[in-house]
Amino acid sequence: MPDNPPKSLTSLPTTKVARAARFAKTGLNVGANYVKHYAKRAVGADSTMADLHAANAAELYGTLSEMKGSVLKVAQMLAMEKNLLPTAYADQFAQAQYQTPPLSGPLVIKAFRDAFGKSPFEVFDEFDREARQAASIGQVHFARLGGLELAVKVQYPGVADSIRSDIRLVKPVALRVLGLDEATVRPYMQEVETRLIEETDYALELRRGQEIAADCANLAHLQFPRYYPELSSPRILTMDWLPGQHLREFLLTNPDQAIRNQLGQALWDFYMFQLNELRRVHADPHPGNFLLRADDGGTVGVLDFGCVKEIPEDVHRLFIALLAPETLADPTKLAALLEEGGVLQAADAPAQRNFYVQTMQASLELVGRPFRESTFDFGDPTYMQALYALGDDLMQQPELRQQREPRGSEHFIYLNRTYVGLYALLTELKASIRTGTE
Ligand SMILES: Nc1ncnc2c1ncn2[C@@H]1O[C@H](COP(=O)(O)OP(=O)(O)O)[C@@H](O)[C@H]1O
Ligand SMILES: [Mg+2]
């Protein structure tokens, strides 16, 4: 919990100059932390990489949380990439969702007037002035209309317009901190930008939510809200209020093993169906996006179709082939697939090739482990620890640290995020899952 609860915002620090100034300052401080680190190291003093990361993470987080909007979304995404980020960043950014200062009443009313020409009190029978939950680029209010209980997600005014300039600000800082070159990371940046910009379009979220809910209607133990287009706009999304608890709260009620397994299985089946049958997936398995219940026999409510990844057919085929048990046992086959995926390149020296094949083999052994058994127990904490340790280990490899060009398809960014997020949820649930196909 923060010492000072966030104050309600009456205005947003959206002017480009103010944002640029804050960012420049963070960039400088991060730079200064590195200088201190290397200076200390040069004289033999003890400054660990962990200290450095913690100092930079705190610095960056402080700036980002003042800026909100898409910047906060970037932070939240980074928080999920525990396997890609040093722990200090992941821990710091994991707080993002819960620390957003709420919008003041007048700003909420203005958002409604802009969309419908009416205040929310005219649109609904009842509308709670105070937000029930913070969202990354908005907040969620409780409302009633004609006997229905509704959730109304209201986007911060100005966020959609400023997102492109936010990205322009974040990019140079991120590139500098990570030591990457703009031209070579362009396809990856493009992929992330596209997803972030899509997230500001609540009309798109509504459509995708409706479609995926309809496609998944036959899967057991899942709940989706109905969406109400006539009460929604590109910046306001109205849907059924779903009962249930976020994962952490739910776990405090000590649900029994059978319920954990059932809810975990519902999540697993939901993701496998989307990945393999729909080739279109809710790509944000953040704990805030699920509401768990035991009182109705055990269901998972699925929220937030703001980030959906469409998987091209060839990428899907490659992904499945990489995870197949035969591939793991056959380095020649693995190398061929890695070439196809752009991880191995024709100009690579034999030692380099070897490094990539071995690294990928170790990664696939771990990531594919649940698929090689008919039942997998995510309750074993050593599994997720091993995944994070692998991530940390990869980050320490000089071959990867000094690499100026990331390798592999940009489509894998959100696929990896989806898998790691799903595995992390199942680990927290301590669920035992039927992962086999039979
Ligand atoms: N339909 C709903 N029913 C109940 N709570 C909801 C509903 N939609 C959102 N919420 C609450 O609001 C939070 C943020 O909503 P979400 O759609 O995930 O926003 P964002 O897209 O910014 O992540 C959720 O974690 C949940 O607690
Ligand atoms: Mg969400």
Image (cartoon, helix red, strand yellow):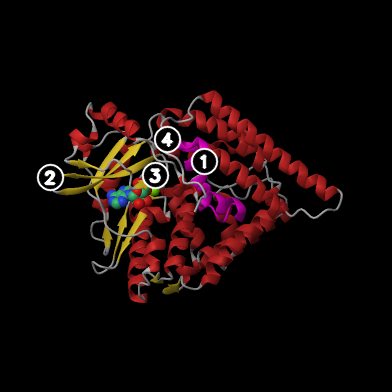
Amino acid type at mark 4: Leu
Q: Are marks 3 and 1 in contact (CB under 8 Å)?
A: no
Disc 1: CA contacts within 10 A as few (<14), some (14-19) or many (>=20):
many
Give the Cα distance between marks 4 and 1.
12 Å
Amino acid type at mark 2: Gly
Q: Which residue is mark 1?
A: 65
Give the Cα distance between marks 2 and 3.
26 Å
**To which quarter of the image does residue 377 belong?**
bottom left
Disc 3: CA contacts within 10 A as few (<14), some (14-19) or many (>=20):
many
Place of residue 133 in the rendered image (x, y in percent of width and height, measured from the top left)? 36, 48
Q: First in sequence, mark 4 or 2: give its number.
A: 4
Residue at the extreme front: 4
What is the magenta range? 66-94
Q: Is residue 147 visible?
A: yes
Q: Is residue 271 magenta?
A: no
Quarter holding the C terminus is bottom left
Amino acid type at mark 3: Ala
Question: Is 398 on the left or on the right of 148, as rendered?
Answer: right
Give the Cα distance between marks 3 and 1.
13 Å
Q: Is mark 3 within 8 Å of ligand 1?
A: yes
Amino acid type at mark 1: Ser
| Residue closer to the observer: 264 or 238 | 238
Please identify, in this view, whether the residue under mark 4 or under mark 1 is nearer the observer. Answer: 4
Q: Is mark 1 within 8 Å of ligand 1?
A: no
Residue 35 numbered mark, or none = none
Q: Are marks 1 and 2 in contact (CB under 8 Å)?
A: no
Residue 9 numbered mark, or none = 4
